[in-house]
Image: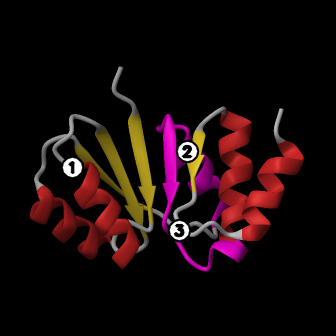
């Protein structure tokens, strides 16, 4: 079964690389970032098929909650991960989402280990 995958920080270097790797593989992709214009350009660059955009800010907890509620898997490509990563992984744990941190941030990893149920 294909999963709904959310990519936070999709307009950055790492996020757009993740999008490039996943695009066209049949996943439903939700890409999020602060800049609506960059999100729209990215969607047009890769294709409109199975890609939905959402303008959001990871520093606003309600927006993180709303984004994560639409995903089965969240790939956090925002930075600095040491500041926002724990906030995002906390929401993923709350909602039962899988979480991927391509940066391997130590504080986020420790939070996951300490709070794994």
Mark 3 vs mark 1: give the one in front.
Answer: 1
Say which residue label 2 marks. Answer: 68
Q: Is residue 74 left or right of residue 107?
A: left
The answer to whether residue 23 is seen in the rendering is yes
The reply to whether the C-beta atoms of the residues labelled 2 and 1 are less than 8 Å apart is no
Classify residue 20 by image quadrant: bottom left
Query: Quick one: label 3 or label 1, which is nearer the N terminus?
Result: 1
Residue at the outermost right position: 114
Question: For this rendering, which residue is in front, 101 or 79?
Answer: 101
The answer to whether residue 12 is seen in the rendering is no
Which quadrant of the figure contains the N terminus?
top left
Say which residue label 3 marks. Answer: 57
Classify residue 104 by image quadrant: bottom right
Mark number displayed over residue 23: 1
Residue located 75% across and 69% down the image? 106
Question: What separation in Å lies between label 3 and label 1 (alpha carbons)?
Answer: 23 Å
The reply to whether the C-beta atoms of the residues labelled 3 and 2 are less than 8 Å apart is no
In what element is the residue under mark 3? loop
Q: Percent position (x, y) of residue 23?
A: 21, 49
């Amino acid at each position: 079964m294909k999963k709904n995958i959310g990519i936070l920080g999709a307009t950055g270097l790492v996020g757009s690389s993740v999008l490039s790797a996943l695009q066209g593989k049949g996943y439903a992709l939700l890409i999020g970032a602060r800049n609506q214009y960059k999100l729209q350009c990215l969607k047009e660059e890769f294709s409109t098929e199975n890609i939905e955009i959402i303008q959001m800010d990871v520093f606003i907890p309600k927006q993180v909650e709303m984004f994560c509620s639409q995903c089965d898997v969240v790939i956090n490509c925002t930075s600095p991960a040491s500041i926002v990563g724990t906030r995002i992984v906390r929401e993923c744990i709350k909602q039962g989402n899988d979480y991927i941190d391509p940066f391997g941030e130590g504080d986020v990893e420790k939070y996951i280990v300490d709070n794994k149920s």
